[in-house]
Image (cartoon, rainbow, N blue to C red):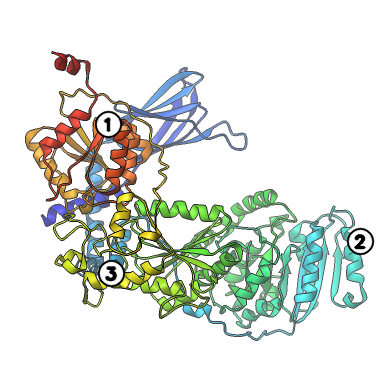
Amino acid sequence: MFFQRLYRVFLRYADSNLVLDQGGRPLHDAEDRPIGQVERLRLHQCRLIVEGRTTAARVGVERGTRCDWIRPAPPTFGAPLRDFVLDVPFEPGPLRVLAISNGNETSQAFDGFSPRRIALARLALIAPFAGALVRLSPQIWRWKRGGDMGARERVKEELGLVPRSYAGVLQADALNASGAAPCPFRSVTLVMPVHNAFGLLREALERVERHTDMAWRLVLVEDASTEPGLRAWAQDWAATAHRRDKVHLLCNETNLGFVRSVNRGFEKARRWPEDPVVLLNSDALVPKGWATRLLAPLANPAAATVTPLSNDAEIFTVPVMCRRHVLRPGMADALDAAAASLGQVAVAAPTGVGFCMALAPRFLADLPDFDTVFGRGYGEETDWCQKARARGGRHVCATDLFVEHCGGASFGTAEKQRLLESSSDEIARRYPHYDEEVQRFLRDDPLTTTRLALGLSWAALSQKGPVPVYLAHAIGGGSEKYLQDRIAGDVAAGGAAVVLRVGQRFRWKLELHAVHGVTSGVTEDVALLYRMIERLPRRMIVYSCGVGDHDAVQLPGLLLALAGQGEEALAGGPQPVEVLFHDFFPISPSYTLLGKNSVYLGVPKPEADTDSAHHYMRPDGTWVDLAAWQAAWAPLMAAATRIVVFSPSSRDLVAASYPVADRIVVRPHVWKGDVPRILRAPLRSGAPVIGVLGNIGPQKGAALLQALSRDLARTGRARLVIIGHLAPEFGLAPPARVHGSYRLGDLPGLVERYGVDAWLIPSIWPETFSFTTHEALATGLPVFCFDLGAQADAVRAACAAGAPGGVLPHPVEGVVDPAKLVAAIRDAMPMSETDIREESR
């Protein structure tokens, strides 16, 4: 049994990690003229991926009797060839790539990937699989013996069974303001090239004058702007009596471009060689007291450049790296005030960003100019920074400073993109490892804590109402689909959402979701977590699901604290609380309400608590019985202003456990799947094929399917196929099949491939909502389930509206009578003409 289970785990590992490639070949039309190229065939995660380029109007892939078609992408930059990627369920054996050009269909044969080649590739994965198990044995032990769900997630990540979750570790020191760091310089030289953007120039210069908190001089390089009146205004502004000694205006007779204009400014700045130089764009709006904060890190002799945080500063952008966004008036100064409360984090970055970049005197003496090969701009500061790194220089971020950047005002964002693209090849040629270093910085994000803390402040300033803070698990499934839809609504409304995720390698993962993307960090420190959430003065705490947390009995108290209630209440006073019932975790540690024999016997009651499945073991080995569990959750239920369930049956179960009936809201999910309707009329006299959708674990009926497959293997009453995965501790008796991963769009082809006649929803717990049931109903095939929970509500309603299928009696002992099940399926199937004639006799 152990080795069978290990083998099934290995098959899941192989499906996730096995990658096979096959070279491409040319495509030709009906007259044998070339019309493109199949560049590669790839097998990965049970998907066949065909990539290429063609002039054909449509491209398809044919394997067996199934053919899938796509239209290639529109051509780019006038190129005749168009890219295509076909991504379809894999079937072993030969295949054909089809193309329709000028109304004619042609094809190119490929060997595909044979079962023998796949088997050999799997054999090659045995050694790395065994090595991974040995390396992960401590985590496997903590998972299996101690119930450590975080260890489970690490095992799954390391084995490649789930996508790896990259997030920086949060550092408490980054939140500790160290006070105003001493500035190592008495004065600073600012170099500002100017080309158009007249309106912003006025505000930028006014802010320099008003907000620079040390002695300064400005070298203003006017680069032949085309906006009327700009140069005359700049000349008058610089000639004002109180500015004559501070402002040095250089006017280019012709447009030299950004790089040469900067170099003119650098040349002038060399008159003051002891002072640092700040390269400042004319669309950078500096806040109060900015200069000493920007220059303070240059006290470290290894620091070559310093760049502040911004709304548009590539790797120094808040809240999401490299995602520019526009700020409302006044928000930048508020964000800078929030940044000033943070600590200075000494982190080396691969480059500085030139919109507002301080350059240390000793490095500028060695590297006095930007390279003019970069023309009008973009790439020049990267080149300079790499040269400084070669001389031992470090590029750091002023994490206690935020400077607004109204990017693209001089060049325009489209032209900026063209300039970026033209400079990237030169940077890659000069510094082959630079892109890899940037990608590493993006992945690891050593500024995670600062970026996320300031991002939370941004969310508080952006949101009209309270910022929602969701507590959610990392298991996926229907609750995650609902959560992502709800977050999308929060963001679309112009705001943001925060997710506190449990059940991963670290106990807490804090995610900030905004229109720009997601920023996240992990920690084990609950006090640090509180400090981060306190940056949201107005927040709404939403319990989504806590299954998988390391010590879930603590969750209600933590949520109350986040809501400004309870013994450890955060500052800001009471905040609204909402509880969602995606499962029944607040009722029992057995969140499906199944007992120790995996049988549902109704709502468990503390006064009749004899089932160990409803007890919870904490990390220290102590046990919490059902009464203590519900006592821990009762204050949260009492504090909730709204309790949301997704089906009438769930409402009844919650109301039977807590006196909250007056605050329960039934809000069925709006199912948004796009499943093509499948028309199939099998002969009732044949052996039906019963399809099961989804990933099937114990609560989803894995044991029931295992027993059913054995009976069907013996009697031949029907055949069984799971389109999804089966938990590795279970196995099906042949000829039953487990297909593996699928997508909704694959269902018509998979139904045809396996000959599915009807769907069975084998779940043995009263689900709160079943997305899989709705997927099955959407196909139009008969759907059967047991008389439990939301799945029965959905099937019963569909049958009342004329859909085929039915609700079967609840299998109290966890088993089902195969003969009765097959008979029910037969009765629900459309009759053939032969069957009609037989019955009419």
Left or right: where 680 falls relative to 708: right
Give the residue drawn at x 27%, y 35%.
92
Question: Residue 725 location, x and y as percent?
Answer: 25, 47
How far apart are labels 2 and 3 at the CA level? 76 Å
Q: Earlier in the sequence, mark 1 or mark 3?
A: 3
Residue type, numbered disc 2: Ala
Q: Which residue is mark 2?
A: 232
Please give the count of numbered marks on the rendered protein.
3
Residue type, numbered disc 3: Gln
Question: Circle 2 sits in a helix, a strand or a loop, which is it?
Answer: helix
Left or right: where 321 falls relative to 632: right
Q: Are marks 2 and 1 in contact (CB under 8 Å)?
A: no
Q: Nearer the viewer, residue 476 or 663?
A: 663
Q: Nearer the viewer, residue 320 or 463?
A: 463
Q: Earlier in the sequence, mark 2 or mark 3?
A: 2
Q: Which residue is mark 3?
A: 630
Q: Which residue is mark 1?
A: 804
Q: Are marks 2 and 3 in contact (CB under 8 Å)?
A: no
Question: Residue 809 location, x and y as percent?
Answer: 17, 43
Image height of 636 relative to 719, above or below = below
Give the residue drawn at x 89%, y 63%.
233
